[in-house]
Image (spheres, coloured by chain):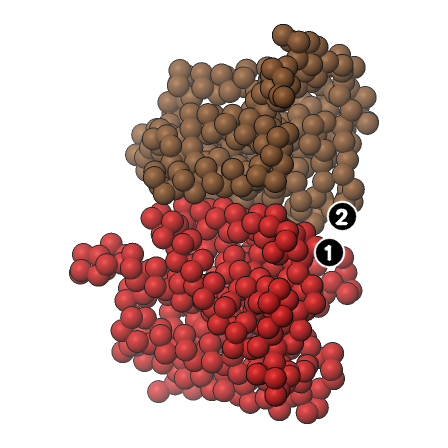
Chain colours: A red, B brown
Amino acid sequence: MVEATKPGEKAGRFPVRAGTLAVLGALGALAVYPFFGTTYMIGVLTEIMILAIFALSLGFLMGYPKLISLGHAAFFGGGAYAAGIVAVRLEAANLFLTLVCALVFATLLAVLIGVLSLRNTGIYFLMITLALAQLVYVVAEQWTWLTGGTDGLVGIPYPELFGFFSFDRFSFYYLVLLLAGGAYFLLRLVTRSPFGHVLLGIGSNERRMRAIGYGTRVYKLAAFVLSGAVAGVAGALWAHYNGIVAPVDVNWPLSATALIMVIVGGAGTLVGPMLGAAVVWFLDTGLSSYTERSTMIMGAVFILFVFFARGGIAGIARSLWERFYARTGT
Amino acid sequence: MISFEALLTHLLNGLAYGLLLFLLAAGLSLIFGMMDVINLSHGSFFMIGGFIGIGLVGVLESFWLALLATVLIVALLGLVVEVALLRPLYYRSHLDQILLTFGLALILEDGAEWIWGTRIQSLRVPEALTGSVEIFGAVVPVYRLAVLAAGVLLGAALWYVLERTRLGSIIRAGVADREMTAALGFNIPVIFAGVFVFGVALAAFAGFMAAPILGVYPGLDFQVLILALIIVVIGGLGSLTGAFWVSLLIGVTQSFGQAYFPAAAAFILYLIMAAVLLLRPEGLFKRRYA
């Protein structure tokens, strides 16, 4: 498994720096793209960036404290529903209101699910997060007067700012770009902080961390809640972008898709999952206009990565870099 | 007013449903106990059992022959999966194997949709088991009783084999301590393959028997997988006794729930689970086979 920061290990430092450069380059390219791109592609990129925030939140959880959640759609969908309900039922599409409501709701949900599921570890944790997330799904599907039931909540507008600015497709793209970059740098800061090092320690040997004296459960809960909150913000953006929130946004296939994004992109890095989001989008939504068997292709690609490239795209990039570095060598 | 007869009907229907779930959860639990792998494609084998069964009943024109053939075919598929896909990952983290079964589940679901389409298909109950009988005034379809009987018999046989035979004690030993069992000279890869194939065959059997009741469609796989996961979480992972009682409880709860409080039926299930997790995170029953 690839780890993001290994202080003192020489070969490991270069790819990290390269990763940062790649991120800055990508952000720059994304920032100028709308001036050349088609409306369709701007929409596609908006969608991918929202999913990238979602994948990033799960990647953080899977890469550092190594918690494998199969119920992450609960926070994404929870945030989407919170934003949608504020925008439609309260008719207040103010950006700060919807984002804050989504953030608060996803945070509370993550505290609740985290407290319940973190009592167990490993496979149990995976199964319990899945089952609890399905509970959220059932609520979303059954509480019809609030959530619109199986039809979903329709007519969610793009957000606005206190009546003097309304987002459109173009400015919304930049909003998403800003938040995607913000989420990346926030989590980067977190993973490089002492707190992040404790999380990494928990991920590699929780028992030892406990023996040193860390209350690992509190740390894991904090990471889980942070991850849930970021996913909730992504969900709110998703609701505004699509104009609709439906039970499918809380259902487990979405959690599974996020998991695939992280594995394909590379757990243990922050850039990897975001790249994974783009790849999986092309395999899933992109290919679906050419073939009906996109799920099968996605499953096969996923299995290939599990078999041959467990470090994901980021892992492949890293080993290529290291090979190159060794050849030009010091 | 809810009549006693209606209650009895729902109870028997729920028990039959619960026993089908038990066959599924038992395989899941056994495979986990042995290999430490949660087989996320377990529901897929259940669904495929139903699909192949429907096809074979048409070809062979015999319910029983088709049942036998279905279980054999799916067991063979399970063997291929174990040897070709899971075995190369034995020495990696269990997570890799779980991820693999998950990828497999995606492929199998899409493959089923490709071959059989998205339409719900149903299986006709064989001539001998059509109609219904009256028990204390309650009308119960004969087929449900047959499912009940088959479930009880298989469950009892499973218990007997695991608890009272030499094979069973080898399996229990493997569950308790894999390295030690291997050191004693037992061939672990063969036992692993055997348990995996047996678990998958149980799932296919349950899927076939469930086809006349639930119908078969892509999506059924994950629906029953999640039920089976909930059962083993509540019952305690690796505990067959736990899986048995919880399956019955869930079958009956679902049956009554859908009849009397359709909106709450799904809730009740998850609420039970949340309560169990809060009070007894390790599940209701102590782990016996692990």
Residue B97, placed above or below residue A313: above
Residue B212 position, x and y percent, is: 72, 27
Disc 1 element = loop
* Distance Cα–Cα, label 1 vs label 2: 8 Å
Q: Quadrant of residue B264?
A: top right
Image check: A233 left or right of A143? left
Q: Is residue A109 visible?
A: yes
Which of the two residues, B33 or A196, is positioned nearer the viewer here? A196
Residue A115 position, x and y percent, is: 36, 53
Q: Tell me which chain the residue with mark 1 is part of.
A: A
User: Looking at the rendered structure, which numbered label has been put on residue B33?
Assistant: none
Residue A311, placed above or below residue B172: below
Circle 1 residue: A293
Image check: A119 left or right of A208? right
Residue A330, placed above or below residue A237: below
Amino acid at circle 1: Arg
Amino acid at circle 2: Trp
Residue A268 position, x and y percent, is: 42, 67
Classify the position of the N terminus of chain B by image quarter. Answer: top right
